[in-house]
């Protein structure tokens, strides 16, 4: 297949970027080393809320666009894996609510009865909650329906992709550390526990600032995701039993039924954190134009559609524009 664009990376960032391009009549191939189910995206809890991502102001713009796209997808939850679920964000330290707080429909201060013991303030909202087990296959089907092609292929270099297409989009996440290379990309390890649902129908999160230990409870169709950790620089993907026990204890203080809930699964993922998301154009040595779209930290799902639109615009503009306001698809 001849291609206009090769997207390197098959997680949520790569797939959404490829979809926007393919649905804009671009001939797109995605090179992915791993099946989508083996990417960091598959481990994510799936809540649409900005977390551990910079620059903050631009992240809000990307997040709000993604919020609206995901809300539309929530109209068909069985197909897309996206539902609108109410919940409470109890710890917002280190984050200026700003436009996010003003723009999310129905977001308000949490009432006392919505906050577990030990939490004095927070915000309540109905937001998209994404089941990544269903959502990633949906994205792959949507890409195929738009004419895009997904290939299981390892990119030795970005210039290798540039020899096969005029445009390359680098959505390799943590892999960009070696592929670019970019030493500013580093892992923030997150460990989760999945348990049977004892009757929880709302999400709860307390994960402010740069804390290494967080608390979040995310009800999914297959169980409840309990978290978590945010350990910068940790590369280990092996679940730690002591950490898992501590996660369950923290979450059980918020919902007592979780203390006895049967454990279904342990997960560990590495968030691809960077001091600032890299969403910009670079000319590769061979002449192809490369749009970098990586470094989204713990907010890959939250900003996925907003960043995809901006990356696609840079492709359509041929690199002549450095950035445009997110919203609407390039034509």
Image (cartoon, rainbow, N blue to C red):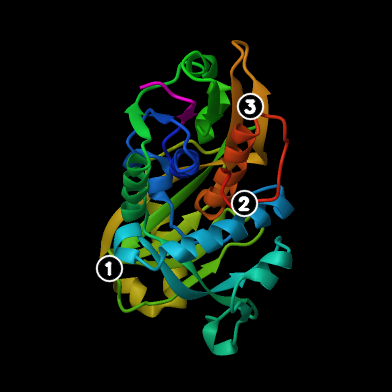
Does dot 2 land on a helix, a strand or a loop?
Answer: loop
Residue 183, given in percent of the width and then of the height, sits at: 63, 27
Pointer 2 local density, CA inside 10 Å: few below 14, some 14–19, many at least 20: many
Q: Residue at x 57, y 27 (%)?
A: 177
Pointer 3 residue: 183
For the residue pair 185 and 193, the one nearer the viewer reads as: 185
Q: Quadrant of residue 27?
A: top left
Q: Position of residue 308 (x, y in %)?
A: 55, 44
**CA separation, marks 1 and 3?**
39 Å
Q: Residues within 10 Å of mark 1 (few under 14, many from 20)?
A: many
Q: What span is colored magenta in the figure?
A: 1-8
Give the number of callouts.
3
Nearer-N-terminus badge (2/3): 2
In the image, which disc is placed on residue 52?
2
Q: Which residue is mark 1?
A: 196
The residue depicted at 55 percent of the width and 76 percent of the height is: 125
Q: Secondary structure at mark 1?
A: loop
Q: Are marks 2 and 1 in contact (CB under 8 Å)?
A: no
Residue drawn at the location 44% of the way across and 24% of the way down? 3
Is residue 54 on the magenta stretch?
no
Mark 3 surroundings: few (<14), some (14-19) or many (≥20) residues within 10 A: few
Q: Residue 122, image x and y in percent?
A: 63, 76
Residue 3 falls within the magenta-colored stretch: yes
**Is any atom of residue 273 visible in this view?**
no
Residue 100 versus residue 295 in the image, above or below: below
> Would residue 250 appear left or right of 284 to someone viewing this image?
left
Judged left or right of residue 232, residue 97 is right
x, y (%) of residue 93? 69, 65
Secondary element at image label 3: loop
Q: Earlier in the sequence, mark 2 or mark 1?
A: 2
Position of 174 with respect to 217 (left or right) is: right
């Amino acid at each position: 297949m001849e291609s206009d664009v090769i997207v390197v990376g098959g997680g949520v960032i790569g797939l959404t970027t490829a979809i926007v391009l393919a649905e804009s009549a671009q001939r797109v191939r995605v090179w992915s080393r791993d099946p989508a189910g083996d990417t960091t995206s598959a481990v994510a809890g799936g809540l649409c809320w900005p977390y551990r991502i910079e620059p903050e102001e631009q992240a809000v713009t990307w997040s709000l666009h993604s919020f609206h796209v995901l809300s539309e997808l929530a109209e068909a939850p069985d197909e897309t894996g996206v539902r609108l679920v109410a919940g409470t964000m109890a710890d917002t330290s280190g984050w200026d609510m700003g436009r996010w707080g003003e723009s999310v429909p129905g977001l308000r201060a949490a009432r006392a009865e919505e906050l577990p013991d030990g939490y004095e303030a927070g915000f309540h909202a109905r937001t998209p909650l994404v089941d990544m087990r269903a959502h990633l296959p949906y994205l792959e089907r949507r890409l195929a329906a738009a004419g895009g092609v997904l290939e299981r292929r390892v990119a030795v270099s970005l210039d290798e992709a540039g020899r096969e297409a005029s445009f390359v989009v680098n959505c390799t996440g943590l892999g960009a550390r070696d592929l670019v290379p970019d030493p500013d990309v580093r892992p923030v390890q997150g460990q989760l526990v999945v348990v049977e649902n004892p009757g929880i129908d709302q999400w709860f999160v307390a994960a402010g600032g740069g804390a290494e230990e967080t608390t979040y409870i995310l009800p999914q169709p297959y169980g409840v995701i309990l978290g978590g950790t945010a350990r910068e620089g940790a590369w280990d993907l092996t679940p730690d039993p002591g950490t898992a026990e501590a996660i369950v204890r923290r979450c059980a203080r918020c919902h007592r039924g979780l203390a006895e809930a049967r454990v279904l699964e342990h997960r560990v993922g590495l968030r691809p954190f960077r001091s600032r998301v890299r969403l910009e154009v670079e000319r590769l040595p061979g002449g192809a134009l490369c749009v970098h779209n990586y470094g989204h930290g713990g907010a890959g799902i939250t900003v996925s559609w907003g960043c995809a639109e901006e990356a696609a615009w840079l492709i359509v503009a041929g690199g002549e524009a450095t950035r445009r306001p997110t919203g609407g698809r390039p034509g």
